[in-house]
Amino acid sequence: MNGKTSFVMHSRHIKVFENLPGDDVKQIMLAIGAYVEKGVEPTFDGNAGLQMAFRFIRVDLDKEAEKWEETRAKRIEAGQKGGKVSAENRANAKQKEQK
């Protein structure tokens, strides 16, 4: 997923984990990591419970990835400007200084 190497864990995800056996929690956490870092879609060997749990969490992962991409694009654009301040921003800053 475009170099993203982290994800946000929401407290509502814990409720999903509470209902899973320990080995399943490990599997889903590893699957989340692979999905976030490499875009790998897990299969869980046909385990419908894990597939359903992952789909629930994937909604948030995808939203976070989209938000991250938007922020990344804005930062790239700002970086390409090289810290140049527009004339309008300079005028606004001068007005604030004079007050």
Image (cartoon, grey):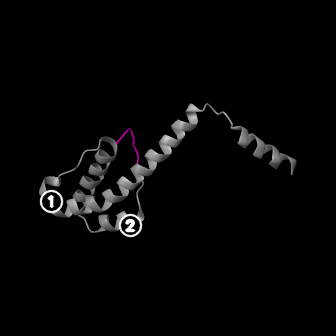
Label 2 element class: helix
Residue 12's disc number: 2
Q: Which residues are magenta?
A: 1-7
Q: Residue at x 56, y 31 (%)?
A: 80
Question: Foreground residue, 23 or 42?
Answer: 42
Residue type at the position of mark 2:
Arg
Q: Give percent across and percent down for residue 18.
A: 31, 67
* Magenta: main secondary structure: loop
Q: Residue at x 69, y 38 (%)?
A: 86
Q: Give percent across and percent down for residue 82.
A: 61, 30
Q: Quadrant of the N terminus?
A: top left
* 24 relative to 96, above or below: below
Identify the image quadrant of residue 16.
Answer: bottom left
Quick one: which residue is furthest to the front in this view? 88
Horizontal side of residue 48 vs 70, given as left or right = left
Q: Residues within 10 Å of mark 2 (few under 14, many from 20)?
A: few
